[in-house]
Image (tube, grey):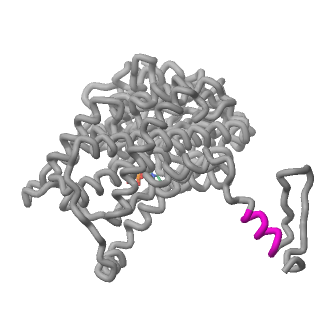
Amino acid sequence: MIPVKSSIGLIGLAVMGQNLALNIARKGYKVSVFNRTAQKTEEFVKNRVKGEEIEPHYDIKDFVESLERPRKIILMVKAGKPVDDTISQLLPYLEPGDLIIDGGNSHYLDTERRFKDLTEKGFLFLGMGVSGGEYGALHGPSLMPGGSKKAYSLVEDILLKIAAKTEDGPCCTYVGERSAGHFVKMVHNGIEYAIMQSIAEIYHIMRDVLDLPTDEMSDIFKEWNSGELNSFLVEITYKILKRKDEETGKPMVDVILDRAEQKGTGKWTSQAALDLGIPTPSINLAVVERIISHFKEERTKLSKLYNKRRSALQKSEEFLKDLKDSLFFAMFMAFSQGMWLISEASKEFSYNVDLFEVLRIWKGGCIIRAKLIDTLRRYISDENAHLLESEEVISLLKERIGSLKNVLKVSIENEIPVPVLSSAYNYFMSLTEERLPANLIQAQRDFFGAHTFERVDKEGVFHINWEEGE
Ligand code: ATR
């Protein structure tokens, strides 16, 4: 009897790959799997496959031959060279029209290059952002595939079935041309950095100014999560703050070292934003703050030389509301900066991204899912208008700016660093300022470099000899 071919293949059996393979198989598709190290495949099959139609392979040629034509192969291998290596191993066994989907966190420029190479060779390629962590991969991630519509149509059925579901449909859509999927996933992670840092700054104020016990902080975040701040990141924050260390009985957060790691996607977002000339200060500063967190020894030494002035503030309903509104404001700015960046990249790189759709697929499954996304979707309908122009947004922000100012005042008085909360404030204030002091900068540039300047009262470019008038 000829064995039934698999609908799809998956390479890379680390946790994300395992969970995605199980998710696909549980939706009724037969999946062939392969991993560089055979032992991982064996362990996966032994420990986690319980009746799902998952066929292990230990030879790449056999793996390819086990797939239906055109072949569809998802790569869940480490980003960077491993993706290129795996593609090179596969190519001798593939035929034109076969499809490779890179589901890792690849840099969008790598995806751009791979798309071009593979397309020239006659293969189909999708660069697909996958968000939702281990849980999402198994139970429904947010999927951000980009490449070509033709490639997408080959796997649309499978992707829609395995994605997270919301009242607005499955969290998967064809994001756009070539590397659009990985670009959008990168910005998703940048927004994630900014929101996480905003929450951390609020926690810092609660801890060191309000002097609140972690249980109480947890209750406050929990209450916030039931309203307009409802989001995955606020939800996990209240759960984290509740958790006690089994060994010491102390709150878990108190025994965790204040040094945050990063894999680079936040940094890539900032780099792309700087290259494209789009302001994303909240993302940039969230990255910087993670870097500063690394200098634990230096911070410890310096903290002793500069004693901080802290005076405990009594918790009040008013101030808690200020904190809540500030977090909303900062989250709004993080999304707003990210959406602007995607919109610019879409124009610059001809991605053809539908922002409304991107927000829709971020509603479920992914780390930045938040109620706020529904609000954003109501206002982002006009591609040419800046989000801040919408009347509803104006009142939303105006209502909260007083709270943010108060929180910043308290932070400054108590010498608490709030880079991302203040970046949200400064970003907003700069964007809404008709006359910035950039006229002086332009004069300085003309002074030392003859870079010329424009005038407010007539057309053209001008240069003067600045020393002459002295
Ligand atoms: P983990 O999550 O376990 O740290 P990782 O090192 O990020 O995993 O690697 C994720 C996947 O990429 C694994 O399946 C890994 O294969 P191994 O189990 O053989 O390590 C795969 N991978 C990493 N480097 C690779 C390479 N150069 N070629 C092929 N696959 C590779």
Q: Pinpoint residue 434: horizontal percent, then vertical percent.
A: 67, 47
Q: Pinpoint residue 265: horizontal percent, then vertical percent.
A: 50, 51
Q: Pinpoint residue 280: horizontal percent, then vertical percent.
A: 57, 50
Residue 61 falls left or right of residue 262: right
- Quadrant of the rendered structure where residue 305 is? bottom left
Instruction: Please say if 139 is above or below 254.
Output: above
Quick one: quadrant of the C terminus? bottom right
Instruction: Please say if 439 is above or below 46.
Output: below
Q: At x 38% / y 68%, what residue is drawn? A: 294
Q: Which residues are magenta?
A: 440-448
Indicate whether residue 70 is drawn in magenta: no
**Front one among 279 and 259:** 279
**Front one among 65 and 379:** 379
Indicate whether residue 442 is drawn in magenta: yes
Quick one: quadrant of the N terminus? top left
Camera sees residue 61: no
Q: At x 7% / y 56%, what residue is drawn? A: 249
Q: Pinpoint residue 417: horizontal percent, then vertical percent.
A: 38, 62
